[in-house]
Image (cartoon, rainbow, N blue to C red):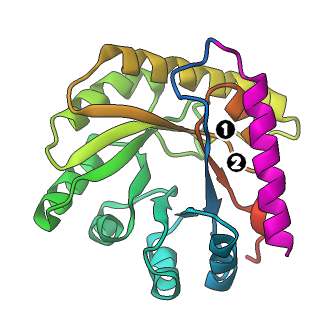
Amino acid sequence: MIIAENINSIQDQIRAALSRRELSLTGTGNTVKLVAVTKNHPAELACEAISCGMQAIGENRVQEALSKAEKIGHTVEWHLIGHLQTNKVRQAVEQFDLIHSVDSQRLAEEINRIAGKMGKRQDILIQVNVADEDTKFGIRPDELFELTQTASLLEHVRLCGLMTIAPYYEDAEEARPIFKELYRWFSKLKAANIPNTHMEWLSMGMTNDYAVAIEEGANLIRVGTGIFGSRNY
């Protein structure tokens, strides 16, 4: 089973990366959660990954997640890692355990409103555009404290950490400063002890750069191609 072999190989590399992490990076613990990103892969492959022990599925689009959930069910965690439009919030809150991509006060408030109607407290991460790329969503680092304060006042939202997507580099080492910077902001927010926040997750690192991300403090990584192979677009 190629998927099983891929997952085992990634888990080995996770352990190796953790062993290289500096002892000073204690804010995210010493374990890493692997999210299997199933974008543009069929539900059957997601089910195979689940049978191999995967406990978290990540999707970029709400509609694709909903169609797969009909076959997969809710026996695993569902993570939304793609951009969320406000008109998809109701479906997202119904489906996802963790939304990685909150990038505005308006979106946070809409999630709060919908979650309140459903009697749910929605776990979220704030997406930060550390590299300031025009093609990427996310807030600037200097906007973090303001949005964190906003989220902390929302009764039906729980801020659980931060997320970033680094630029693609042939050499993953070039992404290291991005990850290092987000860990610095994560640590600052955690030390601030802002009420009604639970700074647990630092979501950074994908197939090409997750080892470097882990070395710099990531405890939540999002891997698709590394598990399932190249996508069919």
Prevalent SS, magenta region: helix
**Residue 178 is at least partly visible in this image:** yes
For residue 141, the mark is none
Q: Is residue 214 above or below residue 35?
A: above
User: The N terminus appears in which quarter of the rendering?
Assistant: bottom right
Q: Nearer the viewer, mark 1 or mark 2?
A: 2
**Marks 1 and 2: CB-CB under 8 Å?**
yes
Dot 1 or dot 2, earlier in sequence: 1
Residues 28 and 187: in front is 28
Q: Is residue 17 left or right of residue 111?
A: right
From the viewer's perspective, is 132 left or right of 83? right
Give the residue displayed 66% in from the left and 82% down from the top.
42
| Quadrant in the rendering for residue 104 | top left
Quadrant for residue 15, please give it: top right
Question: Would you name the residue on which mark 2 appears?
Answer: 206
Question: Which percent across, then down, holds residue 205?
Answer: 67, 42
Task: Give the residue number, with chain letter if any, for mark 1.
Answer: 166
